[in-house]
Image (cartoon, helix red, strand yellow):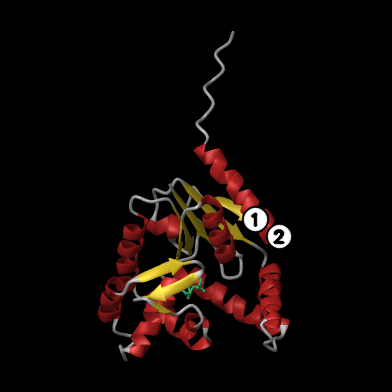
Amino acid sequence: MIITLDGPAGAGKSSAARSLARRLGWCYIDTGAMYRAVALVALDRSIPLEDAARLAELAESIRILFVEGRVLVDDRDVSTEIRTERITLATRPVADAPAVREAMKRVQRRMAEGTDVVTEGRDQGSVVFPFAELKVFLTASAEERARRRFREEVARGHSASFEKVLDSQSRRDEADEKRPVGTLKPADDAILLETDGLSPEQVVDALLALVEARRRPAEPPDRRP
Ligand code: DC
């Protein structure tokens, strides 16, 4: 079974997808981390970020694994490095290149072949797995998402201002919604899950309930007179 979890930055997709996969004992695919990994390796190998053909080749040749919450690229643990600002910035042109997205689609479909997965990103339900059994679009208000990101930054010991976090998030949202490829939009048959006011545990419980409902065979119609 394939479950896709898409949504904007800060909606809590990653932690929800990871916990859901763990609770179900299924594989987990973090597609944002995959784009980030390609950007990191491109910088390491001095591949220009405008060279879409070479980036696409790279996307299909490196081996990305998700192991116990870590991201491994060709056996190297890149979990921390791919989250730096340098890589966040370099990831945008990588994720905007249609050739890279096509390559990623092939890689992601191969990863999901013959196994049960929870896959998380922007285009998983709409483009990569239009045939997924369950598609969820996780949302939260802009203020709620910025509040969560702000708390994370403070918890990491970074000095942050709420206004700055909200402002940079609004710019990311706009870019995600306006880009010509990989546009952030729910698949027509996605279930919208609004997470304002829900704890991470409540989000996972809501997702588990949706999975259970999908797995349960439909009740036979009541034919009694
Ligand atoms: O979710 P994230 O911040 O780790 O994503 C990193 C970047 O990759 C961000 O620019 C959005 C982009 N992305 C994408 O275009 N398509 C996906 N399926 C996942 C992420």
**Residue 23 on image: x %, y %:** 56, 53
- Write the residue at 57% across / 45% down: 210
Q: Residue furthest top?
A: 225
The crowding category of the residue bearing disc 2, from other C-alpha atoms within 10 Å (few below 14, some 14 to 19, many at least 20), is: few
**Residue 53 on image: x %, y %:** 25, 78
- Write the residue at 74% across / 60% down: 197
What quarter of the picture does the C terminus occupy?
top right
The crowding category of the residue bearing disc 1, from other C-alpha atoms within 10 Å (few below 14, some 14 to 19, many at least 20), is: many
The amino acid type found where label 2 is placed reads Ser
Which sits in the foreground, 33 or 138? 33
Instruction: Write down the quadrant of residue 37 in the picture.
Output: bottom left
**Residue 169 on image: x %, y %:** 61, 77
- Write the residue at 52% across / 22% down: 220
Q: Residue furthest right?
A: 197
* Position of residue 63 in the picture relative to residue 15 (left or right): left
Q: CA distance from mark 1 to mark 2?
A: 6 Å
Q: Are marks 1 and 2 in contact (CB under 8 Å)?
A: yes
Tell me the number on the disc at residue 199: 2
* Position of residue 175 in the picture relative to residue 93 (left or right): right
Tell me the number on the disc at residue 41: none
**Residue 31 on image: x %, y %:** 44, 67
Q: Which residue is mark 1?
A: 203
- Write the residue at 45% across / 73% down: 71
State whether residue 179 appears in this view: no
The amino acid type found where label 1 is placed reads Val
* Position of residue 162 in the picture relative to residue 96 (left or right): right
Instruction: Write down the quadrant of residue 183 in the picture.
Output: bottom left
